[in-house]
Amino acid sequence: MTSASGIKEVWKRFVDFIEGHLANGSKKGIIAAWGGLSCDCEWLFRITKDTHHGALLMPRWCPLFMDPKKVVSHHTSCEPNTKHSAVLGHGCEEMWCFVTGDNCLLEARSAMADAKAQCAIAADSRFMNFIDKPVAMMAMVDVWAAKKKARDLRSAELKRKVPTGWIEGEDNSAAWKSSNVTSRVVVVMGPH
């Protein structure tokens, strides 16, 4: 980790790689991530719109997002769907095993193994028949609009006034205290 390249260098290589396959915009790309609308897209949004706004940009010519897991789980007539495949769950490894006929995905949950597995699933004709159906694709501008709205709501919450009857602690702590209550309330939130 100490010898890893910085985010700006890594991001530039990522963008150059994707844009290099899109023939200067004559082809369009699709950002695909298994179950990635809330996780992967959130990190893409944070990197390009929050932490490195203006410095790191999404690859050009990628107007769409697709979640292969959502396609498989939504369309019950899709053969990899558990209704037809007898696969337990819609996990990436399970779907890859069904599509390839193998019984395990070596190094499952490593980024490279999962990316290759998603490509194999999406390239399978039983999946491809559903790629133009509803819920398959979503415009990235819509993904970003939802992420921006959620971010703005979080930001507004931080700026909201303290409820009536409460005063903010003067010791810069996160706790509030009521003028008529002697105990303090501290809320601890775990990771999610």
Image (tube, rainbow, N blue to C red):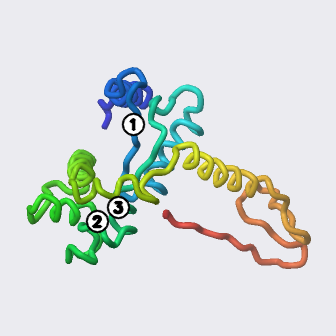
Asked whether 166 or 55 is in front, the reply is 55
**Splitting the image into 4 quarters, where does residue 19 fall?**
top left
Above-or-below relation of 160 to 83: above
Asked whether 62 or 178 is in front, the reply is 62
Q: Secondary structure at mark 1?
A: loop
Asked whether 65 or 169 is in front, the reply is 65
The location of residue 81, given as percent across then percent down, is 28, 70
Q: Earlier in the sequence, mark 1 or mark 3?
A: 1
Give amino acid for label 3. Answer: Lys
- What number is the disc on residue 91? 2
Q: CA distance from mark 1 to mark 3?
A: 18 Å
**Splitting the image into 4 quarters, where does residue 7 fall?**
top left
> Measuring 72% from the left and 58% from the top, which residue is drawn there?
173
| Residue at the disc numbered 3 | 69
Above-or-below relation of 86 to 97: below
Q: CA distance from mark 2 to mark 1?
A: 24 Å
- What number is the disc on residue 29? 1
Label 2 packing within 10 angstroms: few (<14), some (14-19), many (20+) = few
Labels 1 & 3 near each other (Cβ < 8 A): no
Can residue 107 be seen at all in this image of the molecule?
Answer: yes
Image-based side of 54 in relation to 59, left or right: right
Image-based side of 29 in relation to 79, left or right: right
Give amino acid for label 2. Answer: Gly
Q: Quadrant of the N terminus?
A: top left
Q: Secondary structure at mark 2?
A: loop
Q: Earlier in the sequence, mark 2 or mark 3?
A: 3
Q: Earlier in the sequence, mark 2 or mark 1?
A: 1
- What number is the disc on residue 81? none
